[in-house]
Image (cartoon, helix red, strand yellow):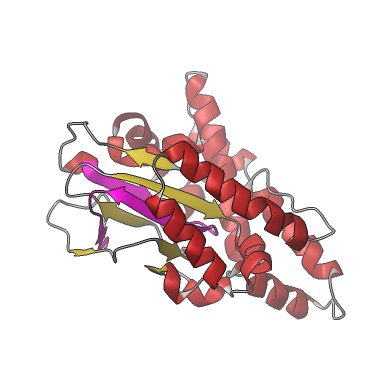
Amino acid sequence: MVRNTMGTNLSPAERFNYFPATPLCSITWLFTGRSECVTADEFPVSLDAPRRPLPEGPLFGGPHERPSVSWNPGPAHGMMLMLMPDALRLLTGIDPSRWLDTLTSVRDVLPADWVALCDTVQQAADDPTRVQLIQDFLEPRWQAARPTTPLSAARYLDWAQGLAMRAALSAPGRSLRQVERRIKQWAGQPMRELLGVGRAERAFFAAMTAERQGRVDWADIAAREGYADQSHLCRATRRITGFSPEALRRRISEDEAFWVYRIWD
């Protein structure tokens, strides 16, 4: 993902960046401008919410069980590489669960060749060059590290179910407890959490489709996506995003700070 607001006149509220809870790990580069981490006790966050500057240089982010918010004091240009946690473990050997809900320098986490890539991308001349550097680095490493069983990752739910199957078949010891332990080791989070995010994502896409058709019926979406009722869907959505489904839908449509969700759509 690339975000470039240079030359754009945004209000202070439009310079927030809202991110949902996610099993994905990330590497983030900020090429121009500054970014601050917002302490988000309530959503939406206010302009006077406590903030702290993020460390300089490329940053590594682990899986997030809670939604998060950042803020740019002015125009900024950055890039984020998103990686499935089990794929990152295969590529680097790191344990995603150690970095749950954290954002820190890549030098604290990643192997030396990855840190060198991050520095090279940071110094590259433009975004197309940066993307090509990342692709050239990842392609041979993934070909060497990828499992013989394909990773199913069309959506989170597909990926989580595929992960469970690989965990059940990959090693001796196939009791439920052993499989669940293996899943958490690979992904950094328990299967229950992964399935919850997957179901919420599926409801998100169902709502976007319904909106394009002119009618969003949250009770119907909740029933079709396996929630006990509309209140169950609301609680799950608020836990992952900080907002009710309807409030989230409106903000995705109207609020610049929800650009990440629009990319997802």
Q: Residue 124 appears at what percent x and percent y?
A: 41, 47
Q: Residue at x 75, y 53 (%)?
A: 151
* Residue 16 belongs to magenta span: yes
Compared with 110, 263 (above or below) is above
Q: Is residue 28 left or right of residue 46?
A: right
| Quarter location, residue 76 | top left
Residues in magenta? 15-40
Let me know if residue 103 is in the magenta part.
no
Q: Is residue 89 left or right of residue 177?
A: left
Residue 118 lies, in percent from the top left, at 46, 59
Q: How many marks?
A: 0
Residue 171 on image: x %, y %: 85, 76
Res. 233 in view: yes
Residue 199 appears in the figure:
no
Left or right of 66, for residue 225: right
Which residue is at the front of the view, 260 or 90? 90
Q: Is residue 194 above or below residue 101?
A: above
Residue most extreme to the left:
48
Quick check: 173 left or right of 156? right
Query: Where's residue 92, x and y in %?
Result: 62, 69
